[in-house]
Image (tube, grey):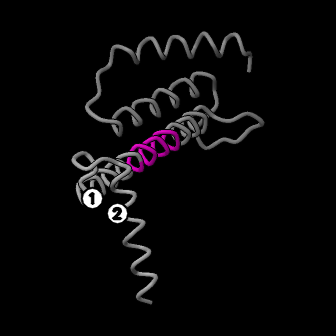
Amino acid sequence: MDGKKLREETRKVNGVLKYIHTKDITELRDLIRCAAVAVGESWCKKEGEKGPEKTYVEAADTGRYQFAQKTSRANREMEWKYAKDSYKNMLANKYKIKEKGFRLVMEEIKQRTANKALQV
């Protein structure tokens, strides 16, 4: 395949895809897959045929897979951030850090742990 011709065809398809509105990510994925099949057929390479290069469908699926990986990783990081924040808020409410101050709360915790150690 000629790289220049491939870039031109991809630019044309991307230009058309900008104007098509989709409801959700599944519909967008199906649309991109159909566009990949159409471009691949125009280049006389069918979806089932294997060659030295990837078909457009495989390239689109690979891109979709990588996008899904990145978004799931970002979602996990955001969930972890919110979990840490909620844990911090729970501790702040339990020990009343805003009212007493951090140093006083730390002294209380040290005394409690020292008392527990003496009891054991």
Specify the label residue 35 is tagged with: none
- Looking at the rendered structure, the kind of residue marked 2 is Glu
- Residue of label 2: 108
Can you give x and y, in whole percent of width and height, for residue 35 in the image?
47, 26
Question: Can residue 115 be found in the magenta stretch?
Answer: no
- Point out which mark residue 95 bears: 1
Q: Residue furthest bottom?
A: 120
Quadrant of the drawing holding the N terminus = top right
Task: Describe the element under mark 1 as helix, strand or loop.
Answer: helix
Residue at 52% over, 31% down = 37
Task: Decide: is 116 above or below 53.
Answer: below
In which quadrant of the rendered image does the C terminus lie? Answer: bottom left
Residue 31 x, y percent position in the rendering: 39, 30
The kind of secondary structure element at disc 2 is helix
Q: Nearer the viewer, residue 50 or 16?
A: 16
> Which image quadrant for residue 109?
bottom left
Q: Residue furthest right?
A: 52
Mark 2 or mark 1, earlier in chain: 1
Q: How many marks?
A: 2
Neighbour tally class for label 1: few under 14, some 14-19, many 20 plus, Cα within 10 Å: some
Q: Which residues are magenta?
A: 68-80
Residue depicted at x 64% and y 31%? 45
The residue at 56%/39% (across/down) is 66
Q: Is residue 70 magenta?
A: yes
72 displayed left or right of 2: left
In this rendering, the answer to whether 18 lies above or below 97 is: above
> Tag 2: Cα neighbours inside 10 Å, few (<14), some, or many (≥20)?
few
Q: Are marks 2 and 1 in contact (CB under 8 Å)?
A: yes
What whole-number distance in Å separates the C-alpha atoms at marks 2 and 1? 9 Å
Eye-nearest disc, 2 or 1? 2
